[in-house]
Image (cartoon, helix red, strand yellow):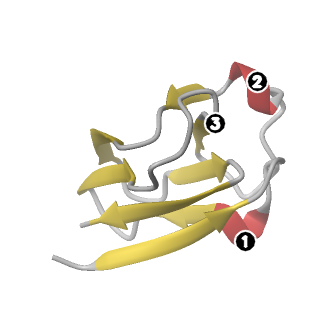
Amino acid sequence: MTSTVIDATETWNPDARYTANGDTDILLSYPENKHRSKIARYITTMSDDLPTLTVGLGHPLLPLDSKPMQLKAGERLWLAGPAKLVIEE
């Protein structure tokens, strides 16, 4: 398994984006032991354009939680925090 650590900021940012090279199964994790109010957010798109939805409308990921996902080739996973998030392929 390959792990990628992403330091997500409070806004959608190209530095906190993961692009699937092919159809890919991943596990998105928020391994930090923070207060449950420190929610990370994620959204997927098919382009490098910043998501038009506000961060608050992104899918939530709580501290110490993980989410298995399937990404299509070229799909982008955008992450927002502030949090260190881990993507495992």
- Element marked by disc 3: loop
Q: Say which label, 3 or 1, has the lower sequence index.
A: 1
Alpha carbon distance from label 2 to label 1: 19 Å
Residue picked out by circle 2: 56
The answer to whether 85 is drawn above or below residue 60 in the figure is below
Identity of the residue drawn at 38% across and 57% down:
73
Residue picked out by circle 3: 38
The residue nearer to you, when weighing 73 against 63, is 63
Q: Nearer the viewer, mark 3 or mark 2?
A: 3
Assess disc 3: are there few (<14), some (14-19) or many (≥20) residues with their C-alpha within 10 Å of its C-alpha: some
Report whether 70 appears left or right of 42: left
Amino acid residing under circle 2? Gly
Residue picked out by circle 1: 15
Q: Where is residue 75 in the image (x, y as percent from the top left)?
A: 49, 52
- Element marked by disc 2: helix
Assess disc 1: are there few (<14), some (14-19) or many (≥20) residues with their C-alpha within 10 Å of its C-alpha: few
Amino acid residing under circle 1? Asp
